[in-house]
Structures are given as C-alpha cells and as structure tokens.
C-alpha cells in the first residue's frame, strides 16, 4: 500500500497523515474551498480541492472522491469518522473501483446502521440488549402496548439513527402518544426511514464502550474500554479509560461480551461496541460504531498502540500485530474535546483564531485541526482539537489536564475551555462518580 486518499478533514485527516508518514505511505488529501489553509492540506503529500464548502459539494461527493482516487491511482481510502465513514454504499463503491476501503465490510456497516437489525443480531449471539422491540413499530397502539409490558420510562428511537440523534425519552403513555408521529416524521427526514422502536430507558446510566479490532483471518481482540458518560446533547465532551466506575469483574465480562459481539458479525478493522451500564453494573448493547472513533487516542495512550497503523495493516490483509495476551493497558488517559462554542449557550462560535498557544507537557497529546490564524467556519463540526492527557494514575492524568488548561491560550473565538475547568474542579468528576446526567445536573443550570 503506497498511496492513501483521506476522505476527511481537520484533526482526523492530519492524524491519519501522521501515521502514513511513519509508514512511508503517500497521502492524498481532499479539501473544500473553506479548508484550503488548514494544516492537514499542507501536511499531505498532495492536496486536491474538491469543491465548495457545503458538505454536499465537498466531503460527501462520492463520485468526485472516487474520480480523484482513480486519477491519483491510490491503493486505499481512509474515511476517518463522520462524513462517509459509515456509508455502506460508499464502502462498496470504493471496493468496486478496485480500491481498498479502510474499514469493515460494507455488509457489516449496513447491519450496524440498522439499529433494530443490529439489536436482533446481537441478541441472537447471546449479547444482552435492553428490553424492547424486535421489529419496527406499526402503530401507536402497538407502541403503547409494548411500552406497557416493558414498563416506563421508555426511549423511542429511530432505527436509522444512532449517536443519540432521533431518540425521545417518554415517561408515560401520554408522552409516548405525543412523540410517536413526530419521531417517525423526523426519522424519515433525517435517515430516510421512518422505522422506530422502543427500548426500556436505563436510568442513572453510564455510557461505556469497548474498542475492538478484527483482521481478515478471523482474529479479534479488544483494546479495553472508554467511559464516555460526560456528554451534552449527545455530544461527547470528556472520555477516559479505564472507566472509574467499572469493577474488574464487570469489566472482564464486558470485554468478553464485546468480543462475542464482534465475532458474531465476523468483524474486521476497528470497531466500537457501545454499552449502556446501570448502577448495578448490568450492561446492555446499544450500538456498534463501524469506524475509528473521535476518542481513539484515549485507547492509544493506555496501550501505546497506533490504531490507524493497525487499520492500515489489517486493511492490506495482514494479521493483527498482537494477540490478546500480548496487549496490556497501563495508566489512565482522559480526552477533552475542544470546540469553538459559546460556553454559556453551547452554540457553535465560528471565526478566526487570532491566538493559539499551549505548553508542551509530559503526558499531554494534542490532536489539532487548526493553528493560530486559522478560521473555524460554520460548515463543519466545530472541533478545534482533542486534548488527551496521560498519567500513571487518574489523579496524575487530571493534574496534567488542569495545568495544561491553566496556561492554554486561544483568542478570537469562544471555546468550551471554561467548561473543562468546571468539570476538572467538580468533586463528582474527581471522584469518578459521574453518570450521563452529570453535565445537566452539576454544570449546566
Ligand atoms: C439509551 C439510554 C438509556 N436507555 N437507551 C445516547 C447515545 C446513543 N448511542 C444511545 N444513547 C442512550 N441510549 C436506553 N434504552 C441512554 C442513552 C444516553 C443518554 C441519554 C440521555 C442523555 C444523555 C445520554 C448520554 C449517553 C447515553
């Protein structure tokens, strides 16, 4: 594999380029007119402008991307996360063009994109799922009947959704009746399918996911867990590993379950099994993400592995570099997602970054997408950088984080750094006792 096209932008495009450089692989970046001055464009071996800023004219232009890939004679395409990364049709078209798709098989992407089908597949494999529907709901009466058997509160979810989009919490029958049609309608608009289903709502939960990896020879390993409970409006803000909540017993069971889940679908490449965990440490499969995740550096910090390198090795048919017994986790890592956003109203705050300076620190890794002088535009996710901190203990990792943010300076636009400081100063966070409602309860009034 000599040349890889990166069908993405920002920090993840730069992150992928860096690994390609260490492997002696040439990179082709594609970029929109809005991104022409970003670091990933400069870092690539070659960069090609793909079109106007809007995603429909740039990063989602399948035909143009394939045309560039063929013209440039690339061997593979890395989709990063978001955009086309979980588009089964794109993956198939890449393969049909004789190019390697760096990710799982299209059929696996498709299965996991259908939340009802993936629930059923997992249940069939003996993986616990939350009590709920095994098929799409046909009528509001059927929904009410099922909800009554399960017991309220329930969540009404779009089968084509995921990541928290298109789901509504219903405390009682009245709420369910009220939300049913609008949820179906929204599901149709956003996902092109109005298929919705019900799950029992797990209260006071934690959102913990397991990183898995498979090769084309049937080998599957896990790379431990990440606790992603600190979210706001289904946007993850902080992720860490190990989870400060899980007991060793539950953790081992979760790893075994994740492997079982991945094995059931003969998973290849990098994937994440998301679990929802109740206060008694019962855990249930929620969804599987068939891509490299934003928060993968947390796993890289505690394992010392390069997950992008693994993706490339596996995609070109090699065996996983390590067996399960050879993979160890050490220390604690925590990631903070630095967004261009108003810290009070939590709305994107695009604009020019007039100053951006930080102190390099032992145990700090910054995966950035912008440098000083760059402009965050309103066209894409306003993630500026991911700040990942490592320590031999959790306390140590958090102390590196605090000292980093104390002398971090970014001017010109608003960011969520004030939120990080509030989180770091919270006793609940310091004790690791947070659940998914932490930000709503403790921070955002
Ligand atoms: C749930 C849940 C509780 N019960 N499903 C959100 C992300 C997506 N992958 C699934 N999500 C959830 N699904 C059941 N049956 C809790 C979440 C959830 C959540 C819900 C409300 C507010 C914040 C949340 C943060 C993480 C997970």
Image: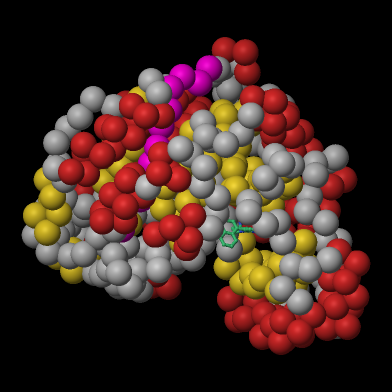
At x 61%, y 61%, the residue is 162
Q: Position of residue 317 (x, y in %)?
A: 59, 28
Q: Left or right? Give the position of 149 relative to 278.
A: right
Q: Which residue appears at 69% of the width and 47% of the height?
A: 278
Q: Which residue appears farthest toward the front when viewing the image?
A: 427
- In the rendered structure, the answer to whether residue 442 lies left or right of residue 92 reads left
Q: Position of residue 50 (x, y in %)?
A: 32, 64
Asked whether 109 falls inside the magenta stretch, the response is: no
| Number of callouts | 0
Ligand 1 falls in quadrant:
bottom right
Q: Does residue 6 appear anywhere in the picture? A: no
Q: Is residue 271 above or below residue 305?
A: below
| Residue 6 or residue 232, whichever sits in front | 232
Please report the residue visible at 12 percent of the width from the left and 59 percent of the height from the top.
411
Residue 280 lies left or right of residue 35; in this view the side is right
Give the camera-side residue of 111 and 99.
111
Q: Is residue 23 above or below residue 132?
A: above
Range drawn in magenta: 328-339
Residue 131, image quadrant: bottom right
Q: How is the image coloured?
A: secondary structure
Q: Is residue 331 magenta?
A: yes
Q: Main secondary structure of the magenta part?
A: strand
Q: Is residue 395 above or below residue 6?
A: above
Q: Is residue 267 visible?
A: yes
Between 134 and 153, the one nearer to me in the picture: 153
Residue 371 lies, in percent from the top left, at 16, 50
Q: Nearer the viewer, residue 394 or 433?
A: 433
In percent of the image, x 64 and y 36: which residue is there? 268
Q: Position of residue 235 (x, y in %)?
A: 46, 59
Specify the quadrant of the image occupied by residue 200: bottom right
- Image quadrant for the C terminus? bottom left
Q: Quadrant of the N terminus?
A: top left
């Amino acid at each position: 594999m000599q040349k890889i096209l990166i069908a993405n932008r920002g920090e993840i495009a730069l992150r992928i380029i860096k690994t390609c450089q260490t492997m002696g692989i040439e990179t082709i970046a594609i970029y929109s007119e809005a991104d022409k001055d970003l670091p990933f464009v400069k870092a690539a071996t070659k960069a090609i402008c793909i079109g106007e800023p809007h995603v429909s004219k740039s990063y989602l232009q399948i035909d143009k991307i394939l045309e560039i890939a063929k013209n440039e004679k690339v061997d593979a395409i890395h989709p990063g996360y978001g955009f086309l990364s979980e588009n089964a049709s794109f993956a198939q078209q890449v393969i049909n063009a004789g190019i390697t798709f760096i990710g799982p098989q299209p059929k696996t992407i498709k299965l996991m994109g259908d939340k009802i089908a993936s629930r059923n597949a997992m249940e069939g494999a003996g993986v616990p799922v939350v009590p709920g529907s095994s098929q799409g709901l046909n009528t509001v009466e059927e929904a009410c009947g099922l909800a009554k058997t399960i017991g309220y509160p329930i969540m009404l979810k779009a089968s084509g959704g995921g990541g928290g989009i298109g789901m509504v919490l219903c405390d009682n029958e009245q709420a369910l009746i009220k939300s049913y049609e609008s949820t179906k309608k929204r599901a149709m608009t956003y996902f092109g399918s109005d298929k919705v289903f019900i799950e029992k709502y797990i209260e006071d939960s934690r959102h913990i996911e397991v990183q898995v990896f498979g090769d084309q020879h049937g080998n599957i390993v896990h790379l431990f867990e990440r606790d992603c409970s600190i979210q706001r409006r289904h946007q993850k803000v902080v992720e860490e590993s190990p989870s400060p909540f899980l007991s060793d017993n539950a953790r081992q069971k979760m790893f075994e379950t994740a492997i079982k889940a991945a094995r059931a679908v003969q998973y290849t490449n990098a994937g994440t099994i998301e679990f929802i965990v109740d206060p008694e440490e019962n855990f249930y499969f929620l969804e599987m993400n068939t891509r490299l995740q934003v928060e993968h550096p947390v796993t890289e910090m505690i394992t010392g592995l390069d997950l992008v390198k693994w993706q490339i090795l596996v995609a070109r048919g090699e065996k996983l570099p390590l067996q399960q017994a050879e993979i160890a986790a050490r220390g604690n890592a925590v990631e903070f997602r630095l967004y261009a956003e108003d810290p009070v109203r939590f709305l994107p705050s695009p604009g020019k970054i007039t100053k951006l300076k930080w102190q390099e620190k032992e145990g700090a890794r910054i995966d950035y997408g912008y440098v000083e002088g760059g402009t965050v535009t309103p066209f894409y996710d306003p993630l500026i950088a991911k700040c990942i901190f490592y320590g031999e203990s959790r306390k140590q990792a958090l102390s590196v984080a605090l000292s980093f943010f104390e002398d971090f300076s970014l001017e010109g636009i608003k960011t969520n750094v004030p939120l990080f400081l509030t989180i770091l100063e919270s006793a609940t966070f310091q004790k690791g006792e947070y659940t998914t409602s932490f930000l709503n309860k403790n921070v955002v009034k």
